Structures are given as C-alpha cells and as structure tokens.
Amino acid sequence: MLTRIFLAHPRSVDEHFFQHMRFALGVAAALFLAMGAVLIHAFIPCLFEKTASKIIARLESRIQRSKVYERVPKN
C-alpha cells in the first residue's frame, strides 16, 4: 500500500521519491509566485503586467524538458 501511494508514480517517470518531490515543489513554488503576481495585478493593473505569463511559459518549458512529461501516458 505505501509503495503504491509514495513510490509507484515517481517510478513510472523514472525518478526517486525525493527527486519527484523536489520537482513538484518547484512547480508549486512557481505557480505560487505566478498567483501572487496575478493577485496584485488584479488590484493594481500597472504592476506585474507580464510576470505571471513569463513564469508560466518558463514552467511549461521546464515541464516539457523533464522526464515526467516524456513518460506520462498521453490520453
């Protein structure tokens, strides 16, 4: 049961648990920063006009270069 919960998916993308955790936390951090920029931009439109878009574009590029993107089955 624990193997399925914690190890099956990281193994499916050829990563160890902590490698996968680091990658996922990096994605979460980038999304958190983008969310903060968009939230501030919503109230003060002249601030962070392109910040979230740039973060998301870099994140997309990073995900596409990763092992995760290459090994996840396409639906």
Image: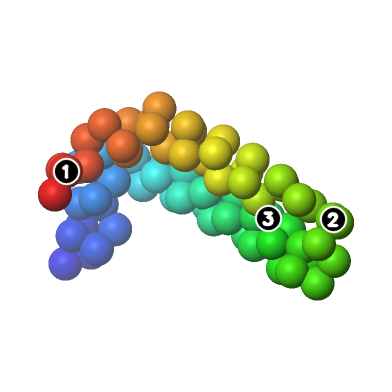
Amino acid at dot 3? Leu
| Labelled disc at residue 47 | 2
Q: Earlier in the sequence, mark 1 or mark 3?
A: 3
Relative horizontal placement of residue 49, taking residue 66 as reference (left or right): right
Tag 1 residue: 74
Residue, x 42% and y 37% (percent of image)? 63
* Mark before the other along the chain sequence, 1 or 2: 2
Cα separation between marks 2 and 3: 14 Å
Residue 58 percent across, percent down from the top left: 56, 36
Say what amino acid the circle numbered 2 marks: Leu
Query: Which residue is disc 3 drawn over?
Result: 33
Instruction: Residue 59: give x, y in percent of width and height.
Output: 52, 40
Q: Residue at x 29, y 58 (%)?
A: 6
Determine which quarter of the picture holds residue 11: top left
Camera-near label (2 vs 3) is 2
User: Residue 20, percent across and down?
Assistant: 40, 45
Q: Give the class, few, some or many, for how many residues have Cα within 10 Å of label 3's Cα (few <14, many ≥20).
A: some
Residue 9 percent location from the top left of the image: 24, 50
**Disc 2 + disc 3, Cβ < 8 Å:** no
Residue pushed farthest bottom? Answer: 43
- Mark 1–mark 3 CB contact (< 8 Å): no
Numbered badge on residue 42: none
Q: Amino acid at mark 1?
A: Lys
Residue 22 visible at all: no
